[in-house]
Image (cartoon, grey):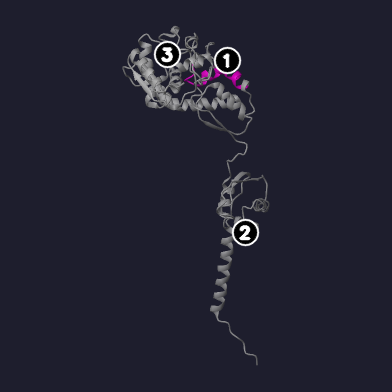
Amino acid sequence: MTKRVRIKPTFFVIVLALIFIIAGGVWIFLASPVNSNDTKDVEIEIKSGESVAQISRTLKDNDLIRSKLLFKVYVKGYKVNSLKASTYKLNRSMNLGEIVSSLEKGSNYNPNMIKLTFKEGERVTDYAKVIEKNTNNSYDDVINTIKDKTYLNELITKYWFLTNDILNDNIYYSLEGYLMPETYHFDNKDVTVKEIINRMLDETEKNLEPYKSIIIDNPHYYMTMASIIELEGTNTENRKVIVGIFKNRLSSGYNMGSDVTTYYGLQVPMTQDLTTEQFASVNAYNTRSTTMIGKMPIGPICNPSKSSIEASANPTQTDYMFFVADKHGKIYYTKTNAEHEKKIKEIKDNGDWIW
């Protein structure tokens, strides 16, 4: 008679435990990142109506997951509601759970999105070049839109800080000074010039809101002043002092005497010194001209920063009447013309003159 060998229950427990341990190890491995050190973006597209199997194939083909089967098991086992159609930026350092979570949440990533960066202190003509370079609009499209009186009147109705002052025919570019320097994102290159301008004016409105009670009676004055000190000063504090100096000069029968307005009036870049004749040229922008005693320029000369807007609205009162900057950006303040001329000579003798 054959004797049966009885296997102790503990044996089954041990085998079962080993199976679970091995299975768990396999699961952890297959669910782990393909390469935890590879954070480079991998762009994939999940199309509407794709099945879990199709999505798993896309992920595997792009080496984002280790196992198509485990991906499908994971989605079903965790009862993931839906994997949303979109374009995604994933990377190989993401584990399976992170990838599934991303696909479940959806993505706002748009591969066609464009970024437009408009710098502080630059002119409308500079901005037009940025728009031409990065969108399907031409330089002339931008300039013509900015000069469109019908469009400008619509904007005046919409934005409290735009007044009929910008409609003056002697102004070179009506929206100069009102387009907030910032980085903006748009869906694609087909964005229109008006969409760009409206977004920038929305940003301007947001940044002017804290000063509305101060500037609402004459926003054109404050934006013009802000544009001048943007180029004359280097920070909020010295810009506040410079605004105070300009106010002193205007109220005392001087012209503002701002070189940067001369450059704008002549429509030349600030890359070289100008002649005596050029500084004395007569136009509605050049505050070096003797015809501009007690007068502001007809409009802004660049698009100012938040710092300059703050300084324009809240100037510092002093007894200074003059200022000059050396090539290092250091600004010197004086009360008399004699002191001013002496400081200029000193700067030149030290080799610190800007030109």
Q: Can residue 204 be seen in this view?
A: yes
Count of number-bearing discs: 3
Q: Distance between the residues labelled 3 and 1?
A: 31 Å
Q: Which residue is drawn at 54% across and 21% down?
A: 124
Query: Relative to residue 126, is residue 341 drawn left or right?
Result: left
Q: Residue at x 62, y 87 (%)?
A: 4
Q: Name the residue under label 3.
A: 257
Numbered range of the magenta stretch: 141-163
Please state the horizontal and vertical placement of residue 185, each as a whole percent of the image. Answer: 56, 33
Asked if the residue at tag 1 contacts the one at tag 2, i.e. Cβ–Cβ closer than 8 Å, the answer is no
Q: Looking at numbered disc 2 in the image, what kind of residue is underneath it?
A: Leu
Cα separation between marks 3 and 2 = 75 Å
Q: SS at mark 1? A: helix
Pair 3/2: label in front: 3
- Residue type at tag 1: Lys
How busy is the neighbourhood of tag 2: few (under 14 within 10 Å), some, or many (20 plus)? some
Label 3 SS: loop
Tag 1 residue: 149
Q: For the residues marked 2 and 1, what is the alpha-carbon distance in whole angstroms?
A: 63 Å
* Residue 214 appears anywhere in the view: no
**What amino acid does circle 3 point to?**
Gly
The answer to which of 284 and 69 lies nearer the viewer is 284
Q: Which of 325 and 46 is in front in this view?
A: 325
Choose the circle earlier in sequence order: 3 or 2.
2
Q: What x and y, as percent, mark residue 101?
A: 56, 50
Depth order, front residue of 68/13: 68
- Residue at which label 2 appears: 70
Which label's residue is closer to the chain start, 3 or 1? 1
Residue 275's label in the rendered image is none
